[in-house]
């Protein structure tokens, strides 16, 4: 079966501006997809070991390793794709180098190819993901996956990373590398692939997200959704926030004193200013959410986890994605 034979999305590419929590969202997405009996492969390509940190498991290597159970009892398998290892595997597959491959690495050829030629590097990295998506069901269930989630580079580099055909055009017009790039592009542009963009309700992340939506569309690929991460509920109602604009602090100080609290003008002024700052933040978030809504894509919210990310928090995020219909 060709990787593009089915219309159902099987490859979920996760990107977002650095600091928005895209690796956490990728992990939560994988857990949400791993329903009863489902197997999901979660891949990373930046060498940061973000998957092992998210699931609190040992560092991932070249082997596909189970890292968690999914929401419905399925399993999440982790893989950290290394460009050098992928190149050695590629050379062995196409050129049968055997021991000669080790000599290439010894003399620095592998480092040259994966560092000086970033387009080839990206073909190798995505190539591992492409291979996993395209596996056909065999006798061993462990060889295949129902879905693959890719923790991709941030939005500032996502267009170049996904546009592998253009990146290798000057380096490989024909041959195995070019054929691999063409096959990867076919998969990325097919209905089997969707790109999910992670953002915060802040000006710069939202702007990068909007630019990425346009860029990915220009490449002929599909944005599946926008995930708004670290959403905070306002402790004050809209009416209360509106009253803070012209609030006289004197009655507030009197009321707090009647309640038995020892307050003074400095403390009261600080409380009022904190409320006004909160109002400004809420207004900014409302404005940024409006900008996201204007692109007409499905948008899902994930809550801020005050206690940080742990197994329970990751499951909470996965449940939120599932309940909102993101998977």
Image (cartoon, rainbow, N blue to C red):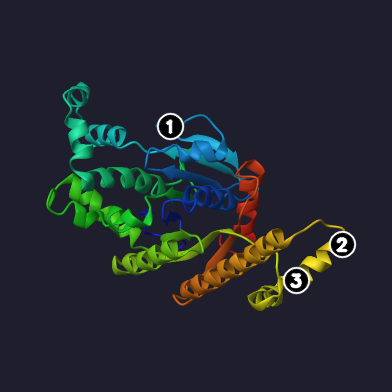
- Is 89 left, or right, of 139 in this rendering? left
Q: Between 252 and 231, which is closer to the camera in this rendering?
A: 252
> Disc 1 and disc 2: Cα gap in Å?
63 Å
Percent position (x, y) of residue 264? 74, 60
Crowd class of label 2 (few under 14; some 14 to 19; many from 20; radius 10 Å): few
Q: Between 149 and 94, which is closer to the camera in this rendering?
A: 149
Residue 207, by quadrant, is bottom left
Crowd class of label 1 (few under 14; some 14 to 19; many from 20; radius 10 Å): few
Upstream in sequence: badge 3 or badge 1: 1
Percent position (x, y) of residue 228? 53, 62
From the image, tell me which residue sits under label 3: 250
Residue 250, by quadrant, is bottom right
> Disc 3 and disc 1: Cα gap in Å?
66 Å
Which residue is at a point 50% across and 36% down the rendered structure image? 52
Residue 59 visible to the viewer = yes
Do the residues under discs 1 and 2 have CB atoms within 8 angstroms?
no
Percent position (x, y) of residue 136? 42, 47
Which residue is at a point 19% across and 28% down the rendered structure image? 97
Above or below, 182 relative to 224: above
Q: Between 31 and 174, which is closer to the camera in this rendering?
A: 31
Residue 92, by quadrant, is top left
From the image, tell me which residue sits under label 1: 63
Q: Between 169 and 158, which is closer to the camera in this rendering?
A: 158
Mark 1 or 2, closer to the camera? 2
């Amino acid at each position: 079966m060709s990787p593009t034979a089915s219309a159902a999305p099987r490859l979920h590419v996760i990107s977002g501006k650095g600091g928005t929590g895209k690796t956490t969202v990728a992990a939560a997405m994988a857990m949400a997809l791993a329903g009863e009996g489902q197997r999901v492969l979660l891949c990373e390509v930046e060498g940061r070991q973000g998957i092992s940190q998210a699931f609190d498991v040992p560092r991932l290597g070249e082997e596909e390793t189970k890292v968690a159970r999914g929401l419905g009892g399925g399993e999440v398998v982790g893989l950290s794709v290394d460009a050098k290892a992928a190149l050695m595997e590629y050379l062995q597959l196409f050129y049968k180098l055997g021991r000669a491959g080790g000599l290439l690495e010894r003399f620095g050829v592998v480092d040259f190819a994966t560092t000086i030629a970033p387009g080839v590097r990206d073909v190798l990295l995505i190539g591992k993901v492409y291979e996993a998506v395209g596996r056909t069901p065999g006798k061993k269930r462990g060889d295949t996956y129902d879905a693959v989630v890719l923790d991709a580079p941030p939005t500032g580099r996502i267009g170049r990373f996904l546009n592998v055909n253009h990146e290798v055009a000057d380096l490989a017009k024909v041959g195995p590398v070019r054929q691999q790039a063409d096959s990867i592009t076919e998969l990325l542009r097919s209905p089997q692939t969707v790109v999910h963009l992670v953002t915060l309700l802040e000006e710069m992340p939202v702007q990068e997200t909007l630019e990425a939506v346009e860029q990915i569309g220009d490449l002929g690929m599909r944005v599946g959704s926008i995930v708004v991460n670290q959403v905070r509920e306002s402790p004050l109602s809209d009416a209360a926030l509106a009253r803070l604009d012209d609030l006289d602090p004197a009655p507030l100080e009197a009321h707090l004193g009647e309640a038995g609290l020892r307050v003074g003008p400095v403390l009261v002024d600080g409380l009022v200013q904190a409320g006004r700052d909160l109002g400004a933040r809420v207004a900014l978030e409302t404005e940024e959410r409006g900008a996201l809504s204007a692109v007409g894509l499905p948008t899902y919210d994930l809550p801020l986890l005050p206690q940080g990310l742990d197994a329970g928090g990751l499951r909470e995020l996965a449940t939120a994605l599932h309940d909102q219909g993101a998977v």
